[in-house]
Amino acid sequence: QVQLVESGGGLVQAGGSLRLSCVASGTFVSINYMGWYRQAPGKQRELVTGITRGGATNYANSVKGRFTISRANAKNTVYLQMNSLKPEDTAVYYCNANARSSWFENESDYWGQGTQVTVSS
């Protein structure tokens, strides 16, 4: 089992910055892909960005050039640096990880509890 704990959300004015962190703990032998999703009120959860263990990244078009994902494998931690925030970035941000509990099992999907990001205009 893997537990993901996010931190760093809050209230910020448009144009400001926030940095989210997500730490993975528990029993696992590897964590491959880690990502950030978000869900705004009345909308579906959407992928914001993700990063593989090797450092390959992908971003939603809406955040390219403003958000940066990074990862510290030794700390089982993924970060999301969010700059030039806009009111439409307001959402609950969820950390996601694909992890393997043992070498005899397939990867499973794990989610954090979410952290609120609110951008005021």
Image (cartoon, grey):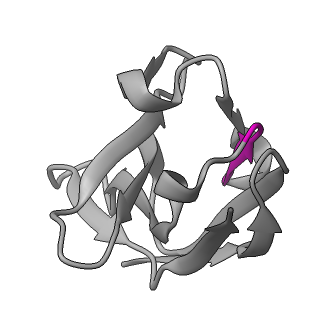
**In the foreground, 74 or 10:** 10
- Magenta: main secondary structure equals strand
**Residue 54, picture quadrant:** top right
Q: Which residues are magenta?
A: 77-84
Picture quarter with the N terminus: bottom left
Percent position of residue 83, x then y:
77, 38
**Residue at x-position 47% and y-position 54%:** 88
Mark yes or no: residue 5 visible: no
Residue 54 seen from this side: yes
Q: Position of residue 76 (x, y in %)?
A: 67, 54
Residue name at image x 15 percent, y 63 percent: 44
Residues 62 and 107: in front is 62
Number of numbered labels in the structure image: 0
Check the image and report above or below for 59 versus 37.
above
Q: Is residue 79 magenta?
A: yes
Side of 108 where 72 appears, left or right = right
Left or right, 94 with respect to 105, comes to: right
* Image position of 73 (left or right of 117): right
Q: Quadrant for residue 82, please give it.
A: top right
